[in-house]
Amino acid sequence: MPSFIISRLLSTLTVILGVITLIFLLIHLVPGDPVQAMLGETATPTDLEALRQALGLNQPLFTQWWQYMTHLLQGDLGTSLYSQEPIIDIMIERFPATLELAIAGLLVAILIALPLGSIAALRKDTIYDNSAMVFSLLGVSIPNFWLGPLLILLFSLTLGWFPVSGRENFLSLILPALTLGTALSAILARMIRSTLLEVLNEDYIRTARAKGLRESAIVIHHALRNASLPIITILGLQLGTLLGGAVITEIIFAWPGIGQLTIESIQRRDYPLVQACILLISVSYVLINTLTDVLYAWLDPRVRYSV
């Protein structure tokens, strides 16, 4: 197990280094001049050049990359070109909202998908199974930018049950979490159904039934436990996806997280802040995938022995 963890950590560090470099290069290739955006169209060439020199944007690209990597190793993400605040302070303020939304969306997906997928597997080729698969198809097909406004129209403007936008209290979290978790629940329900169908045909399940165990006990203590490995993999991958894929949902519901901050910084040509936002999302995704690999190897020794 230690050798497996070390190999995964080395792979993770290599991927993170590549991600940092790729993000830095792509951001600097994006059209638009951040100095021009800061000073406006009426700025003189002398003022533009002076600000470029002060920000280090007139230096060669490799020099800028080396300075960026050096500061990054020291925990310095730089300063926002727009607000002149330390980026680390902005990220600390915004990231909890995104993490809260991602975890809430994941919980919504589990609460919907677990009973739905289990019932579909236990009642294969019945109306319950067909209804669950129709829901899965709709959940995958409906995009967030359509489902979010639809939920707002129904539950906020028509019924008045939940706030339209913002992050004021627990009620403000429900509609964004539903929007974010619905698509994931559809994918997860299909995965639970397929894995349970495979497990329910195993010999130990037939033995448990022959011993007279209740069907609920068989499903919970035997079937779901042995079907949990692929489900955990999907959950780990989707949690990383939720951290990055919450951008549209945050915009729709004016949720003050990293997604909304990323769009705002792109509109303002705030390169250091855009880099930091994308870097946080990318590194979070990589780290969550690494933790998923380690958890998978801990649950199933065959994984670590095969490496």
Image (tube, rainbow, N blue to C red):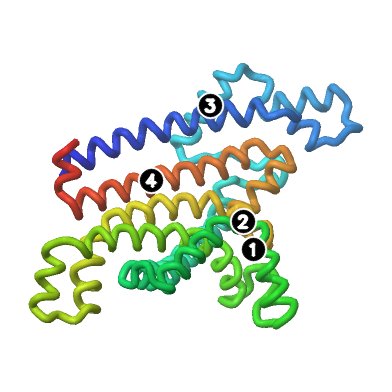
Residue placed under numbered mark 3 in the picture: 67
Residue placed under numbered mark 2 in the picture: 143
Q: Quadrant of residue 256?
A: bottom right
Q: Position of residue 25 (x, y in %)?
A: 57, 26
Q: Answer with mark 3 or mark 1, whichever residue precedes in sequence.
A: 3
- Does residue 291 lie above or below 17 as drawn? below
**25, 217: nearer the viewer:** 217
Instruction: Name the residue at 44% across, 29% down.
Output: 18
Instruction: Name the residue at 40% across, 33% down.
Output: 15
Asked if labels 4 and 1 touch by Cβ distance under 8 angstroms, the answer is no
Residue placed under numbered mark 4 in the picture: 287
Q: Nearer the viewer, mark 3 or mark 1?
A: 1
Query: Taking 72 as reference, is 306 left or right?
Result: left
Q: Position of residue 149 (x, y in %)?
A: 70, 65
Q: Answer with mark 1 or mark 4, whichever residue precedes in sequence.
A: 1
Mark 2: secondary structure: loop
Asked if labels 2 and 1 touch by Cβ distance under 8 angstroms, the answer is yes
**Residue type indicated by callout 1:** Leu
Residue placed under numbered mark 1 in the picture: 147
Q: Is residue 107 visible?
A: no
Q: Which mark is residue 98?
A: none
Q: Answer with mark 4 or mark 2, whichever residue precedes in sequence.
A: 2
Question: In 3D space, how far apart are the residues under numbered discs 1 and 4 (Cα atoms)?
Answer: 30 Å
Q: Position of residue 262 (x, y in %)?
A: 63, 47
**Residue type indicated by callout 4:** Leu
Q: Nearer the viewer, mark 1 or mark 4?
A: 1
Mark 1: secondary structure: helix
Question: In 3D space, how far apart are the residues under numbered discs 4 and 2 (Cα atoms)?
Answer: 27 Å
Query: Taking 22 as reference, is 123 left or right?
Result: left
